[in-house]
Amino acid sequence: MGDVRYLTGEVSAYSTGIPGRAIWSARTNHEVTDDLPEHGGPGEAPTAIELFLSGVAACAVFMVQRLAREAGVELKNVTVKMDAMSDRQAVRQGPAILDRVNMDFEFTGIDEAQAQNLVDTFKRR
């Protein structure tokens, strides 16, 4: 497979008639997302922030796998865990922001130096 210059993506989301519930679609995939109960949503399906973080975490997994292949590192598995926090009582102008985001990597099949090299390279990209 040749180099792909541009990475693209397109999704849509629409209300369902249930307050705080939406359906999002990517190509032929359709999933439910909910707002939190304290915002009037059902809170049963993943929230928008969970979907956002899962997309970033999956991207990190794929990038680290590519970096390991490029470096000839025999990576067996990588797990990326993310959490974030937003102060809902903070007064801000503009859109809501995340006040804190943590990303943790767990590797199997490689030593500590190789793992650190992959994380450092990931951070620079």
Image (tube, rainbow, N blue to C red):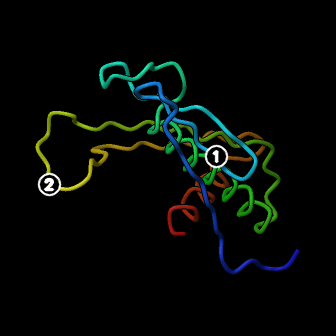
> Which image quadrant: the N terminus?
bottom right
> Does 60 sit above or below residue 106?
below
Residue 31 appears left or right of 15:
right
Q: Position of residue 46 (x, y in %)?
A: 53, 29
Residue for badge 1: 25
Residue 43's image quarter?
A: top left
Q: Position of residue 7 (x, y in %)?
A: 65, 70
> Which image quadrant: the C terminus?
bottom right
Q: Secondary structure at mark 2?
A: loop
What is the three-letter code of the residue carrying label 2? Gln
Bin the neighbour count of mark 1 within 10 Å (Cα to Cα): few under 14, some 14-19, many 20 and up.
some
Dot label at residue 107: none
How many callouts does the rendering have? 2
Residue at x-position 11% and y-position 43%: 91
Residue placed furthest toward the left:
91
Q: Nearer the viewer, mark 1 or mark 2?
A: 1
Residue placed furthest toward the right:
1
Residue at x-position 69% and y-position 43%: 78
> Does 95 sit above or below residue 91?
below
What is the three-letter code of the residue carrying label 1? Ser
Residue for badge 2: 93
> Does 91 sit above or below residue 37?
below
